[in-house]
Image: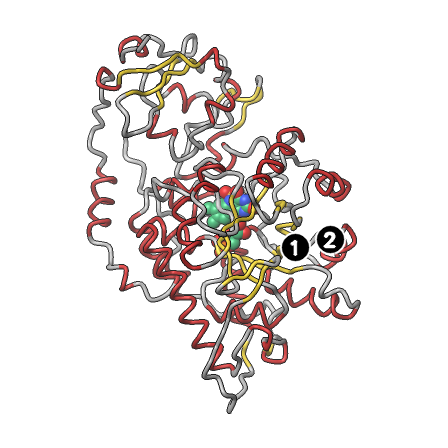
Amino acid sequence: MTLSGNDVAKHNDAKSCWVIVHVIQTPFGKAYDVTDFLPEHPGGSKIILKYAGKDATEEYDPIHPPDTLDKYLDKSKHLGPVNMDTVAKEVMQEDPDEVERQQRVAQKPLLEQCYNLHDFEAVARRVMKRTAWGYYSSAADDEITMRENHSAFHRIWFRPRVLVDVEKVDFSTKMLGTPCSIPIYITATALGKLGNPEGEVVLTRAAHKHEVIQMIPTLASCSFDEIVDARQGDQVQWLQLYVNKDREITKKIIQHAEKRGCKGLFITVDAPQLGRREKDMRSKFTDPGSNVQSGSTTDTSQGAARAISSFIDPSLSWKDIPWFQSVTKMPIILKGVQRVEDVLKAVEAGVQGVVLSNHGGRQLDFARSAVEILAETMPVLRERGLENKIEIFVDGGIRRATDIIKCLCLGATGVGIGRPFLYAMSAYGQPGVDRAIQLLKDEMEMNMRLIGCTKVSELHPELLDTRALSVHATTPVDHLSGAVYDPLAVPAQRPK
Ligand SMILES: Cc1cc2c(cc1C)[n+](S(=O)(=O)[O-])c1c(=O)[nH]c(=O)nc-1n2C[C@H](O)[C@H](O)[C@H](O)COP(=O)(O)O
């Protein structure tokens, strides 16, 4: 039986709460009875009650993979189709901020006017919705580590070679055995639909076009299968995993990913709890806290991050590694390692790689930049003859090909890039991501030539002067990326 909008509208409170979620193009939505689910919703009950008896699609879509309700809400609560023509359209009074934002979108620079990855950040800040910008751009506490990630590269100088025949430059490489056109991968960043209605599949298409690897986030807006289905030909994807307290759920996710052809399992180890990201919180992703988890009051004004991560297992430890090795044949890489002692432990544990990373500064503020950890790690691995035992990846603050080259000279296999691709996707869709990758390739070719190298295997530490790297006294002010940061980029709250 097809329900009408009125049928649903009668169930509009905590005692009986029905919502509609629908695929934009089809005339029928689906109604769900979420009354019993209210106290369990990680994002709090209030955000659901705001849409009780109504169409919740616009709020639901960017955060939840499409199959979430089918997967996690008991079938008895699926109430059937709703004729969307009978659902009263919310008369949204004109939001002046949204009007201004649409004007900025209309006036945004041409894609061709973006000459580097920072340009995408500047455009994204102007054109993105506040919640989306808040979530993507935010980092933990004072955001010092996020800025240090990029400025650490400014403390490394080149010692270029001259009079080398650099006519033919080839910066292709292999990562976990997969050939890549450039030593970068698109790292896992959650909630792709906050920036682009298509979400992570935009990154999938760009990754295929440029022969780079995409790491699929656990907290993607698209479903895992949507992202894998968007893969083309022999395109390679990796899975980023937040480990669930319920190991059965984690085992299912891992084995499904392996069955679907993922070629690497990147276990995130720097987030036993997601960091406190104030820009994300300021944008009030969800309504102020309420009674969420069986009586405990979780302050869901912690923004999107907290709202979507309550399942993460803070008890994860080294003793769990053998279990992961028992449930999958995929290479296992620990993402978020931040000291050489833990790299040595990773070698001992028999994993295939680590990502030296501080989660883009979104976790522990005042964690060191990954490139500084890399400079600490590689000499120790070399000293012990372990440098070929494990692949070392790096991410955080990589915005220029010179950053990539510095990491490779120090011994990294490849680097992950996050925000720049999110910003490019949010501001310009796939053409934006395509241009961002192409800009990096152009910079790679030029800078490899200028340091006197023709291929990745020639990139060694003696091409660098890293004496200042661990001296934090004078970190050059990073004007370009600094200019895009305005923690108060939230318009003054207008009196209601
Ligand atoms: C920008 C961003 C990064 C996230 C990210 C979301 C965003 C918007 N999310 S998060 O919501 O939980 O924080 C993830 C994530 O899902 N899993 C993960 O392992 N890393 C996550 N990261 C960290 C990411 O994988 C890289 O470590 C980081 O982005 C590298 O720094 P840059 O952004 O400066 O390139």
Q: Is residue 362 left or right of residue 127?
A: right
**Tag 1 near tag 2, CB within 8 Å:** yes
Q: Is residue 342 left or right of residue 129?
A: right
Q: Is residue 480 above or below residue 9?
A: below
Image location (x, y in percent) of residue 140: 52, 47
Residue indicated by mark 1: 354
Q: Quadrant of the C terminus?
A: top left
Image location (x, y in percent) of residue 487: 41, 49
What SS does tag 1 mark? strand
Give the amino acid type for the residue marked by disc 2 in the picture.
Ala
**Mark 1 residue's CB less than 8 Å from ligand 1:** no
Quarter of the rendering containing residue 245: top right
In the image, 165 versus 103, the foreground residue is 165
Q: Is residue 477 above or below residue 95?
A: below
The extreme front residue here reads 233
Image location (x, y in percent) of residue 434: 37, 58
Quarter of the rendering containing residue 26: top left
Residue occupying image coordinates x 42% and y 13%: 33
Residue indicated by mark 2: 346
- Whether residue 400 is visible, yes or no, is yes
Visual colour scheme: secondary structure
Give the amino acid type for the residue marked by disc 1 in the picture.
Val
- Whether residue 139 is visible, yes or no, is no
Residue occupying image coordinates x 51% and y 29%: 299
Label 1 and label 2: CA atoms lie apart by: 7 Å
Q: Is residue 116 above or below residue 233?
A: below
In the image, 75 versus 464, the foreground residue is 75
How crowded is the residue under tag 1: few (<14 C-alpha within 10 Å), some, or many (20+)?
many
In the image, 174 versus 300, the foreground residue is 174
Residue occupying image coordinates x 69% and y 54%: 352
How crowded is the residue under tag 2: few (<14 C-alpha within 10 Å), some, or many (20+)?
many
